Amino acid sequence: MVLNYIWIAFFIIAFVIALIKVIFLGDTEIFTAIMNSTFDSSKTAFEISLGLTGVLALWLGIMKIGENSGLINALARFLSPVLCRLFPDIPKGHPVLGSIFMNMSANMLGLDNAATPLGLKAMKELQELNPKKDTASNPMIMFLVINTSGLIIIPISIMVYRAQMGAAQPTDVFIPILLSTFISTLVGVIAVSIAQKINLINKPILILMGVICLFFSGLIYLFLNISREEMGTYSTLIANILLFGVIILFILTGVRKKINVYDSFVEGAKEGFTTAVRIIPYLVAFLVGIAVFRTSGAMDFLVGGIGYVVGLCGVDTSFVGALPTALMKSLSGSGANGLMIDTMKEMGPDSFVGRMSCVVRGASDTTFYILAVYFGSVGISKTRNAVTCGLIADFSGIIAAILISYLFFF
C-alpha cells in the first residue's frame, strides 16, 4: 500500500505544482513538458527492459549451469551458518542462499550488469518458498533492503565521472563512500531485523561483521598507499577477473559433473527473456511517476524548502546543493548520475558540494527502481514494510554521507 500511495502522490503533487506555475507564474509550457516526460520515460522503461534482456539471458544461463551442476547447492551449504541468521525463514542449505551470495558479491564489486540478473534469479527462488504469492515474504524484504542499501567496495563509476570532470584527485571520495554505504547497509539490516524480530547478536554474524571491518580496514590502507591511476586500473581488473572466473568455474564444474553445459545455459537463458518482458509494466509505472514529479519542479520545491527550514535553525546550509542528487538517488540511478555530474559542472568537482554529491550518490542504491524490477519480476503487489525499511536505509546513508563529507572535505 505504501508504494501505491507514493505513486499516486507523484502525480497529484506534480499536477498541483504545475497548476500553480500556470496560474501564478504564467508558465504555459509546463504541462507540455510534463506530458513529453511521460512519453520519454515510457520509452526509457522499454529500452531498459530491452537492454536487460541479453544480460539476463547470459547470467540466468550461467546460473542454470551452476544449478544443474550442483555448485549452487554446495555454495548454499557453505554459507548457511551466516545467511540463515539473516534469512531464518529460508531452509538451511537451500540453493537460494547461493544465489543471494552471488548477487551480493556482484553488487559489492560494482558489477551492476551481473548483479541485477543474479538478484532476479534469487527473487524467483524466494518466490517459490513464498506461501503468499502476491505478498512480499520476510526473506524477500531483507534481500531487497540489502540491495537498496547499495553496499559497494569500489565505486569505480563515480570515480570515473570525477576524472572526466577534471577532479584533481578523483579517488578522494572513495573512503567517505565506503563508510556511508556501510552505514546504510548496517542500518537497513538492523531495521528489517527489528521488524522481523531477528536476533543479530550471535557468533556467526559477529564473526562476519569482524571480517567485514578487517576487510574494509585493509582496503582503506591499500587505497591510501597506491596512486589513483593504480587504484582505477587494479579495481577494474580484479572485478572483471573475478567475474569471468565465476563463469569459467561454473562451466568447468558442469563439465566435471558431466552435464550438458550448452543445453543448461540455453534453458536458463530462456528465463531471461520472459523476466525482461514481465518487468516492463512496473518500470513504466515508476519511471513515469518519477519523471512527472521531477519535471513539474516538485523536486526543486522540496530541496528549496529543506534549505529554508535548515537556514531558520541556524545550521550551515552548504550541503543543500547536494540534496537534489541525494533525493533523486532513491528514485532514479541515471537521474542521480545526471544531477551529480551537473553539480560538479556548476560547482566544480573539487568543491565541497561537488564532492558531497558524489558521496551521497554512492551511499545507497535506487530504492524504487529495485522495488519495481525485483518485485515486479515475480508479481509481488503487497510490499509490506519493504519500502519503509528501504527508505530508512536510504535516509541513514544520506545523513551519513553529509556528516562524513563535512568531516573529510569542509
Image (tube, helix red, strand yellow):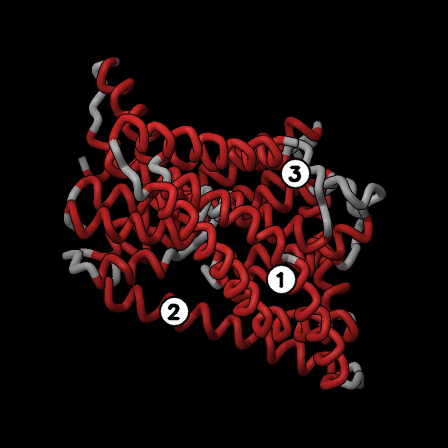
| Secondary structure under the numbered disc 1 in the rendered image | helix
Measured in 3D between alpha carbons, the distance from the residue under mark 2 to the one under mark 3, in whole angstroms, is 34 Å
Question: In the rendered view, does 240 fall on the left or right side of 381?
Answer: left
Q: Earlier in the sequence, mark 2 or mark 1?
A: 1
Q: Quarter of the image holding residue 15?
A: top left
Which quadrant: the C terminus? top left
- Residue beneath the point at 58% across and 37% down: 189
Q: Within 10 Å of the Cα at label 1, are there few (<14), some (14-19), or many (20+) other Cα atoms?
A: many
When the figure is inspected, residue 264 is found, relative to residue 299, above or below; the finding is below
Q: Within 10 Å of the Cα at label 2, are there few (<14), some (14-19), or many (20+) other Cα atoms?
A: some
Which kind of residue does numbered mark 2 sit on? Thr
When the figure is inspected, residue 337 is found, relative to residue 390, above or below; the finding is below
From the image, tell me which residue sits under label 3.
203
Question: In the rendered view, does 19 fall on the left or right side of 284?
Answer: left
Image coordinates of residue 265 in percent, x first then y, are 71, 79
Q: 166 or 260: nearer the eye?
A: 166
When the figure is inspected, residue 323 is found, relative to residue 284, above or below; the finding is above
Image coordinates of residue 39 in percent, x first then y, are 46, 55
From the image, tell me which residue sits under label 1.
118
Q: Quarter of the image holding residue 254?
A: bottom right
- Residue beneath the point at 22% across and 62% down: 163
| Secondary structure under the numbered disc 2 in the rendered image | helix
| Secondary structure under the numbered disc 3 in the rendered image | helix
Image coordinates of residue 329 in percent, x first then y, are 41, 44
Measured in 3D between alpha carbons, the distance from the residue under mark 3 to the one under mark 1, in whole angstroms, is 28 Å
From the image, tell me which residue sits under label 2.
236
